[in-house]
Image (spheres, rainbow, N blue to C red):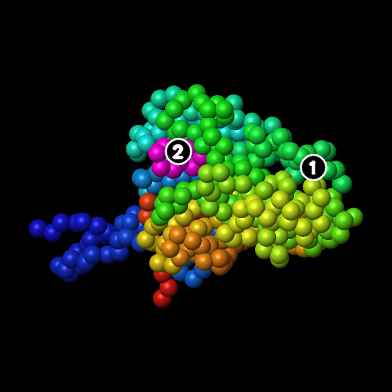
Amino acid sequence: MLKRTDGLMRVVAGVVLVGLPSARSMVAQTGPACASDNAGLTVPAGFCVVIVTDQAARARHLTVAPNGDVLVAIARGQNADGGVLVLRDTNGDGVADLERRFGAGAGSQVLLHGGHLLYSTTDAVLRYPWREGAMEPAGPADTVVQGLPGDRSHRAKTIAVGTGNALYVNIGSPSNSCQQTDRTASSPGKDPCEELETRAGIWRFDATRTNQRQTDGTRFATGMRNSVAIAIRPQDGELYAGIHGRDMLFQNWGALGFDEAAGAEKPAEEFVRVRQGDDYGWPYCYYDPQLKQKVLAPEYGGDGQKQDRCAEKKGPMIGFPGHWAPNGLLFYSGTQFPERYRGGAFIAFHGSWNRAPLPQGGYNVVFAPFRGNAPTGEWEVFADGFAGPNKDPGGAAHRPVGLAQGPDGSVYVSDDRGGRIYRILYRGTR
């Protein structure tokens, strides 16, 4: 007796013919169908792109559960109330067709850790009980950390969990360069800068404790204006970050000889390995990519050359182009992508607003390979085209924010401008 196991079966002239497999079985064998135009992105040969959803308005950082569900932190804004969005693909075509929403607050990041979903907002880190395969929490949230400073600029709190349940929280500065009058030409900087006591650094808390406040944590590293992109590298267990550099060298200090090109290209966006006690020098110092060293900021008597106190501040492992805004960081640990990607860093750049008169830049995802436990220093644009023809914050179609790896080794990218979630797969070259 013949048993139908898949596809279509029919009898012609006494002969059993097995036809093409069903659409669902083809998906299971080959994976989801990629967009014919790769969703407008340019990716390396052998890669392709699936649009998981276009309905995740104000999507910030994301994570992917072991069953493939995509969990997204949602910022508050027009048509977005914040909280957590959970997306599920029920038929294997790569497109989310089921969603759940829960929680509140201006969401920044979500992480799965130790049977919980950690969710960070502008002033707190919450912890929901989470069962594998669920789309909603198993109970109400506990507050892990509360009362974090979130006034003025750089309010988003991004998080990472390291060994020993160490919970790392980025707390960005509220200003550009800690001036006495912020973003004002020739206004000197505050010295000492009191912002460093509670902001412009990474704090460490205990991911298993509840009702902690900032004073219960440890200032792990300082002098980091805003490190939205933070992550633990699985291959070495260490914390890494991408730091947003300061703005307005030309606009505020043109009279001292800082020209338009200097304002566009400096300072570099810093990619760093973060260890306890590190000081990266903000606001007193910035990293000059041409001189390849930290120099004294003009607010503190700098002239674009002088190092002074900055000679002892920690520099970057890689300096990326100025003002690109690193927002997402992922170390690849899967096997779907070719060998050269394993252990390397993907960085999502949200995009610049102040590189004029040069063209605005970023709005892309780059890849920085590692050799052993250190980057080679080289990097390349991995995915581009998110913004479309208008590379500026107001005109960009999409702006990449978060990065996550799926259980199959795909890389997911969130977009807080157009509400799109991308999934990048490797299919190989012929």
Name the amino acid type tagged 2: Ala
Split into 4 quadrants, where in the image is the N terminus?
bottom left
Task: Please rate how many residues cluster around mark 1, counting C-alpha atoms within 10 Å: few if below 14, some from 14 to 19, many from 20.
Answer: many
Would you say the magenta stretch is mainly helix, strand or loop? strand
**What residue is shown at x 21% (from left), y 66% (from top)?**
17
Q: Earlier in the sequence, mark 2 or mark 1?
A: 2
Name the amino acid type tagged 1: Gly
Quarter of image, res 390? bottom right
Cβ–Cβ below 8 Å for labels 2 and 1? no
Quarter of image, res 172? top right
**What residue is shown at x 41% (from left), y 76% (from top)?**
430
**What residue is shown at x 76% (from left), y 51% (from top)?**
297
- Residue that carries the numbered disc 2 in the rendered image: 166
- Residue that carries the numbered disc 1 in the rendered image: 189
In this view, the residue in front, 343 or 301, is: 301
In this view, the residue in front, 295 or 321, is: 295
Q: Secondary structure at mark 1?
A: loop
Q: Relative to 100, is 91 above or below?
A: below
In this view, the residue in front, 318 or 135, is: 318
